[in-house]
Structures are given as structure tokens and as C-alpha cells.
Image (spheres, rainbow, N blue to C red):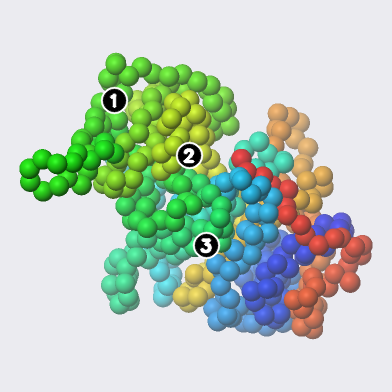
Amino acid sequence: MESHLVTAFLRLVQVFSRAVSATTFARLLVVMVGWVLTPGEHAVTAALVEMCVPGVLHHEAFHRVFSRARWSADELGRLIVRLFAACYPEDEAIGVALDDTVTPGKGPDVYGLSSHVDAVRSTRRHRAFCFGLCFVVLAVVVKVPFSNRAWALPVLFRLYISKSVCQKMGFAYRKKTELAREMLALFATWFPGRRIEASLDCAYANATVAKDLPKNVVLFSRMRPDAVLTSPDVPVGGRGRPRKYGERLPTPEQRARDKSYPWDTDRMRLYGREQTVRFKTLRACWRRAFGDRLLSIVLVEVPTGKVNLQVFFSTDATLSADPKRAARAILPRYARRWSIEQAFRDLKQHLGFGDSSARLPNAVRRTNPFVGLTFTVLVLWFAEYAVDAAKVPFRPWYRHKRNLSFEDILRTARAVLRPTAPFLVEACQNHNLHQSRPPNVRTLPGSSASPAKACYVRPP
């Protein structure tokens, strides 16, 4: 057993003990390790089986951790993000990505269960629906030493409940965009003096998200090619009611066809590969979404496919002073939004995000966020301590692999944490997990690791 890796993992997870009681932390730790060790479909009971809990402790005590215990997933997310945000220099912006994902599910009396549009299976002509739960997720985007792509580490979660279910239950309906804005505002309060760069899907580029957004939050997203743009200069004087907005400008697709504005060309690294980009830049106001706020806009020519123009923007109007600087700033920041899609894939396929059959409101709201935070803990632990001990099988037919994946992280974590199951269950049984020190570190061989420091991650 690599005892120094076990100790490092326990010290990293120990940060959660500040937000929960000692007993709740002991049970959360048992479920977390058991969840990591579980192959196939995941559940709380499956995690307990992997930890050999049956016959030692009653399973209902672990279910009550999610349904009745007093703790907040937001507070756990705040604690873990402040742990690794120290690696960012004070003058560096913190990059975040925000999107929603649907987890299929069924069953009677499951809180929040309804039908949602499945964006993965939908096309422009056909909308596919999925019956299950929908979560809006905010993740911090970081660069890790074992991969050349950016990784999204989930830290905040909100359960979206459809309007029909809200009417049936008798409480107020909240749109996905309202949940997204709430999470962005909450995240901004954690870092009041830092610039936060949020990469959003075009569905979240609207007035609901932008309304009263904190000044330190800068949005990077995509707009429609036929968006109505206006000048930032409002005419003064004249007859009639004073104007609120400036003169109407050509739409992005009209500007793209205008030969008096030439295309610029530059080489950029987007989505993991170098490519030549033809673009135009401008500054304008998008009245419908952002009112009189000035935006930096980049028009990108798409040489292949049915869509020949993509339009990206940022709420930082200072980027458009230099066209190439604007494109180099906006396009890579929007492109890193794809990291949250990769995180959703890894969470669902390898860590059982959405597999839980929880039914009660608290359990539904907290089980999937707990899985997402487990993902974040595993990536941070692997990046800081376990890269050299990675368990990567030899595949002679797959020799071109250069980067490690989450599957490699999970394989390494299972090999390291499996021998700790008896110690953690014994500690949980004896209630000797205290907030002042990591659980049962003294019983593990080679437990001399130093306390967890800022993890080895950096902004992409």
C-alpha cells in the first residue's frame, strides 16, 4: 500500500471536516472511498458493499447523511476551490465554465424528476427528450501537469426543476439561467477582488444571466449571426422622447459580407490543435441580452460544414482595441468551455454521476453534487501527489497515448485506496474522526506526509 498517497488523500479530504460534524464526515469519507472503488453502476449501498460495511454498521446511517444530515454542498465546494485557487497568482483571472447536464432516471416519488431536452441526442431538426434529473453545474477550469488540455473541476451544482413539476408541487419556478446567475454571483463572493472569466454556452448568454452581475465577472460566449447590434453612442437632442440606445448597426452576418471590412488571419491553438483562423472584430451593444453594455465581438469564418459563420463575444470591451489581441483572448477562453463537457462524460461513464436512486429532496439535491466534488478531489489529489504512481496498463496497440485520462486517475485511486477500507470503517465505527486531524492517519504505515498545500494546477 502506498501509504504516503493514502495520507495525502486523507489530508486533502480533511478540508471538508470544517463544514460537517465529525460523525457526518466519517460517514461521508466511507461513502466517498466506497464510491471510488465501486465498478459498474453506483449507489450508496454499492459503496458500502465495497467497504465491507454490511454486518458492521447499519446502512440507514449512511443514507441519512444525504437525506437528513445538516451540511451544504455549496460550502464543501467553497472549501475545496479555495484550497487550489491559491495556485493562481493574484493578478491572474480565475476561469470557470458553466453548463447543464441531464441524467436519465425513473421511479415513483423521485423529487424533481421530469422530462428534459437531451442536447447530446438532439439535432437541429429533431429534439430528443430524456426523463430524469437536470443539474446546472459551475466548474473551475485548470491546467494539470499530466494532460495538455484544460480540465473542468465541478464545485457548484443546482437542481433544475421543470415548470410543470413546480406547479404540481406548489412552489416558484426558476429557470436554468436564474440558477446559473445565482451560482456566478455566489462564486464571485468567494473571490471579491479577483477577475472571474466565465465561459458559457449560447443558451446562457442572455439578460437573465447578465442582470446585476458582479463587476469582477467577465462573460465569454456566443451570439446569433443575425443579432441586432447598436452603437454605444446615444444621440442627444432632437424632437420627441429621448433615445435610450444608439443607432442600429449591421448584424454580424451583414458585417461578414461587407468587403470594406477585411478579414484578419492568425494561428491559434483551439480545441487541442493549431489552426488558422479568419476573423473580424468590432465593438457594439447587444440590446436584447446586455442592454447598453459594450461588448467585444469576434466574427469567425467557418470553411467547412453548413454553418459558415460563428460569432463570439466578451463583456470586456477593452479587448477590441487590437483585433488580433481580441481574437486571441476571446476564442481560446470560449473554447475551454468544452472541458466541462468532457467532465460530464467522465462523471457519467466512470464515476456514476446520476446513478443514485435517491428520492427525498435533500438526497436528490446532494448526492450528485457529492459525486462531482469527489471527481474534483480525485483530480487534485492525482495532480499533486500521484502522477508518478499512475496505474496505466501497457497497450502495444495504443502507443501514441501521451496524456493521462480520468480512467487512469480512477484506476490509480482504486489501487491506492482499497487497502484502507477496514481502517476507515473501524474509524467510523469508533467515532474517532475528529476535525483537528485526518482520520486514522496514525494507524496507516508511513503516515508522515505534510499537510495539503495548494495543488499543482494552474490557469489554462
Residue 96 visible in the current orientation: no
**Farthest residue toward the right?**
446
Residue that mark 1 sits on: 255
Point out the tag, 3 or 1, that comes first from the N-terminus: 3
Residue at image coords 76%, 50%? 384
The tag on residue 334 is: 2
Residue 402 rendering spot, x and y as whole percentages: 71, 33
The quarter holding residue 415 reads bottom right
Residue 207 rendering spot, x and y as whole percentages: 32, 52
Q: Amino acid at mark 1?
A: Arg
Point out the tag, 3 or 2, that comes first from the N-terminus: 3
Circle 3 sits in a helix, a strand or a loop, which is it?
A: helix
Viewer-nearest of discs 2 and 1 = 1
Q: Amino acid at mark 3?
A: Thr
Q: Is residue 55 left or right of residue 157?
A: right
Q: CA distance from mark 3 to mark 2?
A: 23 Å
Residue at image coords 79%, 51%? 385
Q: Is residue 358 left or right of residue 62?
A: left
Residue 399 visible in the current orientation: yes
Circle 1 sits in a helix, a strand or a loop, which is it?
A: helix
**Farthest residue toward the left?**
239
Q: Amino acid at mark 2?
A: Tyr
Q: CA distance from mark 3 to mark 1?
A: 39 Å
Image quarter where the N terminus lies is: bottom right
| Relative vertical location of residue 397 with respect to residue 41 in this rendering, above or below | above
Image quarter where the C terminus lies is: top right
The tag on residue 189 is: 3
